[in-house]
Image (spheres, helix red, strand yellow):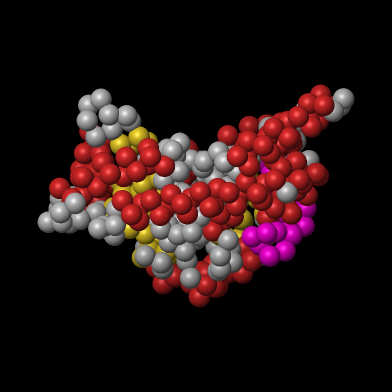
Amino acid sequence: MANALSIDLSKAIPPTPPELTSGLQDVLAQLGSEPNVGERLRRNRIGGSDEDREAGAVWLGRRLGAKPSLDRVVVAHGTQNLLGLLLRHCIGERQTLLAEALTYPVLVPLAARYGVKIRAVAIDKSGLLPDAFEAACQRWQPKALFCNPTVHNPTTSVLPAARRRSVVSIARRYGVVIIEDDVLGPLHKREPPPLATIGPDVVWYIQSLSKCIALGLKVAFLVGPNALNVQQLVSPVSNHSFWFPSALAAEIATRLIQSGRAEEICQSIADHADQRQAIARNTLRDFSFQSEAGGLHIWLNLPSRISGGTCVAKAAALGVQIRAAEAFSTLGKSANDSIPQAVRIALTSPTTDAMLQDGLARLASILYGSTDLAP
């Protein structure tokens, strides 16, 4: 396998369907033909222009059930910049943020940059455990909870409605705000509703276009609990342009939403993700993994004879990149025994179905080699 084509199944990058290509071509042609195009890009858009926020509110209303008021909406240069603002505003240095025991891998180093301590909250196959969340509130006196309840990264779990109500209730009881990352929500399009619809008074809701439209747009939306909260978040950093959306990216995103093309692109990506999951179910049919509608990745539980680290190393030797559970852990290096032996496999990064099938077949050869199953 030394000369085998390298196949990256470690990054959950959305595909580029024909709807994205045609949508971008139309928007850019329209923009380029306008005599005032330079004026459209002349100034920074602090939290998005009124037009950007209106489009964002319409887009978010599809998931939230109702369009949020514009004074609660912020448009930014990607999720990580929004998280940075919230880490400083809602939590602060030497204070505690709770997060699922497995979570978005950028969160831990990002929190460290802002001097924020992270404590893990236990999860199971359905997601965050409310009892564990309440116990963590009692023990750590946290300022906030970061969670990804819909098509969780990395496990793909979808938190049940009853648990969502419990989590919101506990957050209110202990004065904890919730930062909800709903990046795959637009692709899932199923119940239950986001936490932000259950507890809008305690939830800061983030939704990026990185998975449902295009990663390179770097446009993300935030909905705050109320207008005053949003003003208090944005005002101190209104002259710090690192988090502002690129005027060109915001313009493209706004026009894709206004024209209805964004919805077409999102649906095509969701359909593509479901097709890739069907390939995974066939190629890995002898092995247990979790997946959800619209998910760009699957979560594969490893046979008992192979660890996550060993599987990643063996896969790399065969030219396939994947990620083990350790990469997503908030438990710390001393808690390796508590980290599940599982790997996340991204399905939509390969440009063709054949590349994905090849990569999964190489992984399957590793898994068959660690079991008594015959391929």
- On the rendered structure, is 58 left or right of 35? left
Q: Is residue 172 above or below residue 181?
A: below
**Can see residue 181?**
no
Q: Residue at x 77, y 57 (%)?
A: 69
Where is residue 120 shown, x and y percent of the image?
39, 57
Quadrant housing residue 191: bottom right
Q: Is 253 on the left or on the right of 12, as rendered?
A: right
User: Who is closer to the viewer here, 321 or 324?
Assistant: 321
Magenta residue check for 171? no
State the image coordinates of residue 318 (x, y, percent, origin top left): 24, 34
Asked whether residue 242 appears in the rendered view, the answer is: yes
Highlighted range, magenta: 61-77
Q: Indicate left or right for 196 with 67 as reference.
A: left
> In the image as oriented, which residue stretches furthest toward the bottom?
162
Q: Position of residue 364 (x, y in %)?
A: 24, 47
Give the quadrant of the N terminus: top left
Magenta highlight on residue 68: yes
Expressed as whole percent of the image width and height from the top left, the position of residue 342 reads 29, 53
Whether 7 is drawn above or below 364: the answer is above
Could you tell me which residue is drawn at 58 percent across and 49 percent down?
A: 268
Q: Is residue 366 above or below residue 203?
A: above
The residue lying at 20 percent from left, 55 percent from top is: 303
Based on the displayed image, in which of its 4 quarters is residue 179 positioned?
bottom right
Determine the residue located farthest toward the left in the rendered image. Answer: 372
Residue at horizontal 74 percent and vertical 54 percent from the top: 58
Q: How many marks?
A: 0
Picture layout, residue 3 above or below residue 359:
above
Pick out the residue farthest to the front: 354
